[in-house]
């Protein structure tokens, strides 16, 4: 390919990925899931001059516990910084916050094409097949459901995917280029910057750095050269991340998100909301060997089936089955190491937290690897079929055409359903606000509200909200007393762990402190349906 051809090819792939993600973003009108609301809300607070704060306190494990809450005690800030830029340019709206992910999602498709082109070159495919396979990877990623969905959401998934893919591509090229191994290469500086940006996006960047160490050691360049290859990107990455470490140290008392490690001790997903009974090593080990092993089996199955297979079916099945044969080359080695490490660590070290989204939001590089694997095996299969049937015309396009078609079908079926769900959540919170208005209690005057979706509450109403722990009524009363002005508990949904069933037994300590409020039903049938599973209590002991 000439440079002009390569540029035009990349432009077409970017445009395809961009167009699909713009459509997907237009379908999603309310920040869903909650983490997208968090990034968006902090960006708006930053634009308003309030600083890096959130109006929701969704976890109580990292002090200081105050409202508004210093943001990013666990998550990382780059998605918010990106959203802040576009919100400053186009208005402080959710639509504007989606723009960075949409643009980066298109770029991720281009990077997938470039990685696939390197893989095709290593496989020694004929020129025509090589081009078709690599372009097919880029266009398939443009319509592949897991990549499209998160490419329309302002969260950490798509930025991390871009930085990880760019890093893995550079790693493979640096090690493959023996001249780069023997002498200093400026691309090492770029690699360090990408790893540093990934570290500002997700904690899984540590596995990206680990991948580079593994790749360097596997290349056996000699210990002095290996030290230089590791240290140069490491110093750059550390320099990029250092200001954030200083900020965390001054605000939270630690340069690293210690709560992320504490999540490994979760017994249930609700432990992240714990108030009186936080996760401890003693309680974790007290489960016994059976539950500990069972949690890991559940984590592996969740990450494999729910995240990788179901979101990308049927192409994901083909790609995963083919991985042992398609992922052996050097050009894919960094992506394989990163994918395998991320999968195993989240499944085995964070088996409970991963069922609540840990691996889901770090899986972009893995999805890309699966797509490449599927297209490689489809190319081989079509080539063998063409040879066996003695076809006289090139048919390499059949594999990519199949991949693009089946991926498009699932994406264009699922995204509207996801968009409808986002509309329903937005409608629900609008209806809740109208209910409180009807009894003379505007939601912006309620004070801190305890609820099971605190980030959505604070994003919808711009008022403080506290996460509902899965604990006893006395614990909730204690939580309310710790934050003056907290009077209401709003449960959105039929259940949240032991709530509301825990209030059914009058003999339970603390039950007498909860008086259910019978809010009037909305006049519109759609609004009434939206709040039929919403219950509200006033907290106050006699």
Image (tube, helix red, strand yellow):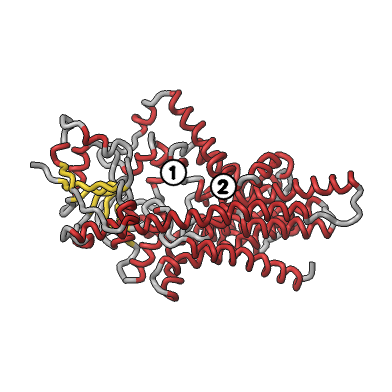
Which quarter of the figure is the C terminus placed in? top left
Determine whether the residue tagged by mark 1 lies in a helix, strand or loop.
helix
Image x and y of residue 5, in percent: 76, 70
Which quarter of the figure is the N terminus placed in? bottom right
Q: In screen coordinates, is 19 left or right of 25? A: right
- Which is nearer the eye, 512 or 240? 512
**Residue furthest toward the left?**
542
Who's the residue at 36% across and 52% down the image?
A: 73
Image x and y of residue 427, in percent: 35, 58
Image x and y of residue 483, in percent: 19, 51
Who's the residue at 20% across and 38% down the image?
A: 473
Q: Classify 10 Å Cα crowding around label 2: few (below 14), some (14-19), many (20 and above).
A: many
Q: Which residue is mark 1?
A: 356
Residue 251 visible (yes or no): no
Determine whether the residue tagged by mark 2 lies in a helix, strand or loop.
helix
- Which is nearer the eye, 92 or 45? 92
Q: Which residue is mark 2?
A: 311
């Amino acid at each position: 390919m000439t440079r002009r051809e390569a540029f035009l090819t990349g432009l077409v792939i970017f445009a395809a990925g961009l167009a699909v993600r713009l459509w997907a973003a237009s379908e999603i009108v309310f920040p869903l899931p909650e983490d997208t609301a968090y990034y968006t809300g902090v960006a708006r607070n930053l634009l308003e001059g309030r600083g890096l704060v959130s109006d929701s306190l969704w976890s109580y494990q990292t002090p200081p516990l105050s409202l508004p809450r210093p943001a990013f005690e666990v998550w990382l800030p780059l998605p918010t910084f990106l959203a802040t830029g576009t919100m400053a340019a186009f208005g402080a709206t959710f639509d504007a916050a989606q723009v960075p992910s949409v643009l980066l999602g298109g770029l991720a498709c281009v990077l997938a094409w470039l990685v696939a082109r390197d893989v095709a070159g290593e496989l020694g495919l004929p020129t025509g097949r090589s081009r078709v396979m690599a372009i097919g990877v880029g266009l398939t990623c443009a319509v592949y459901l897991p990549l499209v969905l998160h490419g329309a959401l302002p969260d950490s998934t798509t930025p991390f995917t871009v930085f990880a893919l760019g890093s893995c591509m550079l790693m493979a090229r640096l090690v493959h280029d023996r001249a780069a191994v023997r002498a200093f290469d400026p691309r090492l500086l770029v690699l360090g910057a990408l790893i540093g940006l990934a570290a500002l996006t997700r904690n899984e960047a540590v596995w990206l750095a680990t991948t580079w160490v593994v790749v360097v050691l596997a290349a056996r360049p000699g210990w002095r050269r290996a030290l230089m290859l590791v240290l140069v990107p490491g110093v750059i990455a550390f320099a990029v991340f250092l200001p954030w470490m200083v900020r965390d140290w001054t605000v939270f008392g630690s340069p690293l998100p210690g709560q992320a490690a504490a999540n490994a001790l979760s017994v249930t997903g609700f432990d992240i909301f714990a108030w009186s009974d936080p996760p401890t090593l003693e309680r974790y080990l007290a489960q016994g060997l059976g539950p500990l092993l069972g949690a890991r089996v559940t984590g592996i199955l969740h990450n494999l089936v729910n995240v990788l297979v179901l979101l990308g079916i049927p192409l994901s099945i083909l790609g995963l089955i083919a991985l042992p044969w398609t992922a052996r080359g050097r050009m894919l080695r960094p992506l394989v190491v990163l994918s395998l490490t991320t999968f195993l660590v989240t499944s085995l070290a964070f088996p409970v937290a991963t069922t609540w989204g840990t691996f889901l939001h770090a899986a972009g590089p893995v999805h890309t690897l699966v797509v490449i694997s599927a297209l490689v095996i489809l190319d081989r299969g079509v080539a063998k079929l063409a040879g066996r049937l003695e076809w006289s015309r090139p048919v390499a396009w059949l594999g990519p055409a199949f991949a693009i078609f089946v991926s498009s079908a699932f994406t264009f079926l699922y995204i509207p359903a996801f968009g409808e769900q986002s509309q329903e959540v937005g409608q629900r919170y609008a209806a809740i606000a109208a209910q409180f208005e009807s009894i003379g209690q505007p939601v912006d005057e309620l004070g801190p509200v305890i609820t099971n979706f605190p980030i959505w509450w604070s994003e919808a109403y711009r008022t403080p909200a506290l996460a509902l722990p899965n604990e006893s009524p006395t614990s909730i009363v204690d939580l309310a007393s710790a934050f003056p002005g907290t009077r209401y508990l709003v449960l959105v949904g039929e259940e949240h762990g032991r709530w509301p069933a825990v209030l059914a037994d009058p003999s339970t300590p603390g039950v007498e402190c909860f008086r259910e409020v019978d809010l009037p039903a909305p006049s519109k049938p759609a609004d009434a349906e939206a709040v039929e599973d919403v219950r509200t209590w006033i907290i106050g002991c006699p």
